[in-house]
Amino acid sequence: MDSLQALLSSDNSLSLKEFNDTAKKLFELNSDLVDVTDQELLCLAILVNLTSKVECRLDNIQNAKTTLNSDLFWTKFRKVASQLHTHNLKWPDSRVSLKHQIRVIPQNGELPEFGWAGNSSDYRIGRILTSTFLWRGCKHSLASVWLDDDVVWRKAAYKLGINKASWYSIKKELQELFSGSHFPEEVDQHTHELLFPYKDNHYLTVTPVASHVDQLLIQSISGVPIQTLSFPHPSALGVLCGCMGGHMRFIKQSPLLRRSATKSSYAEQQDVFNVYPVTCKQAVSIYREIIDVNTYSSLRLKRRARLLVLKQLDDVLSQWIAPFIRLKLIDKDVNKANKLSDEEHYFLLSKETDLQDFSRYLNRKFHGVLEYNKYTRSYSYHQRLLGVTQKRLASILERAFSVNAKVTSDNEAELYLVLKNLRLTEANGLNNPYVAGMPSMIGLYGFLHRFERQLIDCYPEVSVESFALHCNQYQVIYKNKLPAYSIPEKEMGIRRSGIVPECSFDGKFSIVVKLHKHSGFTDKLDVELLKQVLPERLWGGSLHPPFLYEQTEWAQLFYGSNNLKQFIAINLFDGNWLAPVREIGFDLSQNLELLKEKAKLSLCLVGYRLLEPIRSREVVSGIHAFCEPLISLCSREHSIDVIRAASNIEKQIFWQFMPISQSCTTLQVGPVCGESNATSQST
């Protein structure tokens, strides 16, 4: 049912419990909007009866009148109305004081969608003030129709016993409440506080808060991976968590692309060629689009579609030949590698090879793989595909091996520190209220900022310019976290946090840091000193060097991007790079739609947007602001894609912290040498 009219038409066939359950679900936050046009009296009666504990039908007009005639109801109504919020300070810790609310009212005066968090005994009142419905084609809540003062709703309220004076008295109070934005005067001891570098070596303290609208969007989204976490005492965390029964949904993300087992009868070659990417469902759709003759409204659209599908084909072919290219790059004894043909052995052992000739061999091998799979058999040696794949393979080979072919002198202007295969345990995978399991890029900047501060004692002329992140191994763990230490209050009362769900992850990560040396500094950097000043914690987890039995040098310095590319080709070939995506904003709904379209994309925390002007509060730094997390898209790039790319590696996979301007509104990391994801200035 999607309207109250439909509910009324079936009231004869429903029992009391079925009718009440159906009516209650229509007004839950996570339900589709119900149309109440021409049913205003019934809508008010149901909302009011939802606050009553009397056992009766929710459309009972008499019980609604009795409830509204109670002074206790209106006392709670006014208190709950003052606790409405746009950002939930009590998430995820219900111990935050009830007197702290955040309401961000747009400058155009349009009433935003409100949530509520307060004493769980007031949950029923909070539900009627936050329930939304459709009226005359527009989305409304009880507060919005009250402020609009439409005569239809006023007459419906009069029929329930609300007189004219009470109606306008409540309207005046709501107008005063929502006349402008509201922020707490002090910071609660149970809220998080983060320090960011500000101006003149000072720091700014920020407190991240969850957006009610964005959390609500995730509870009803479909088509993306979802992880559900159960929170105890949901009604104390807010009306949204309460209506979900404490089972809150998060977007489940991973820094590694999902690896599927090869499902081809041509599996005897999977040791040196990754067969699955060229025979999977996604690859079949790419082949179909290449050979089909589609009609476009303009030549420009046709070229754009062609370039897009060729780029997707490059990704598929790169994944197919990636293990074989790695064998060539690492330059080890290939005689131990089994299932290699004579052509492949000769190519791996010879110093100078004809890439064009070998690309033709690979093309024949590729179409042989298609022929042995029942889903791709029809595309094998297809006249519209054969020439295209040969050219793409030749291009991939030329770019991949051009890294090794280049002999470059050390470029003192470009200095990179590579921290290889660092072991991370019990890192925080819930670094924001929307995405679970993904590392925080702004958190990595915080780690490197601390490294930079500790580096001052050794090399005061050296600073961190930009950074890149590579993930090789990853495992996510969902469990319940033990309660925090009890905090005694002034009256010796004990407030416990309770057991809360936790998302943590372990893995192996490599960090590449571009260091900037100030003019006049010519000393060589000592890697051992750099190791000593490296922080021991990252993303709330413990950071360790590789195991001793791995016998690897985990910290190295490189001069020049070409030398860095060569190191990546040999030592960081497996896994994924988390690369920034340019020209992408922070609108969560738009980013979720893009996430559904491209498997390479993932969501991660890249910074925070300030919700208020910076002001003085009793915090460590003395200046403070409340902020909301900025969730943006990143691309999970394979090393073969990084190596074969013609663009500068720094512009491709590196992140940097955006400089803070005079009218700062965002604290974020973004792509290097390009437009930021969003401006750092107020618009």
Image: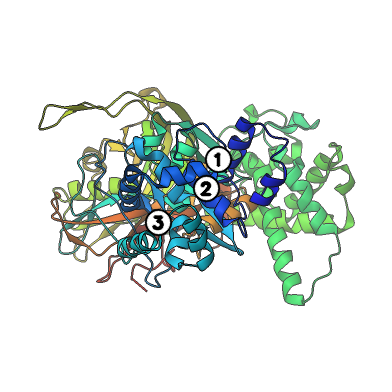
Q: Position of residue 252 (x, y in %)?
A: 52, 39
Q: Which residue is mark 2?
A: 45
Viewer-proximal residue, 66 or 1?
A: 66
Q: Position of residue 28 (x, y in %)?
A: 53, 44
* Discs 1, 2 touching: Cβ within 8 Å: yes
Q: How is the image coloured?
A: rainbow
Q: Which residue is mark 3?
A: 655
What element does badge 2 sit on? helix
What element does badge 1 sit on? loop
Query: Is residue 184 shown to the viewer in this render?
Result: yes
Looking at the picture, which amino acid does disc 2 mark? Ala
What element does badge 3 sit on? strand
Looking at the picture, which amino acid does disc 3 mark? Trp
Q: Quadrant of the N terminus?
A: top right
Of tags 1 and 3, which is closer to the observer?
1
| Rendered view: 505 above or below 255 | above
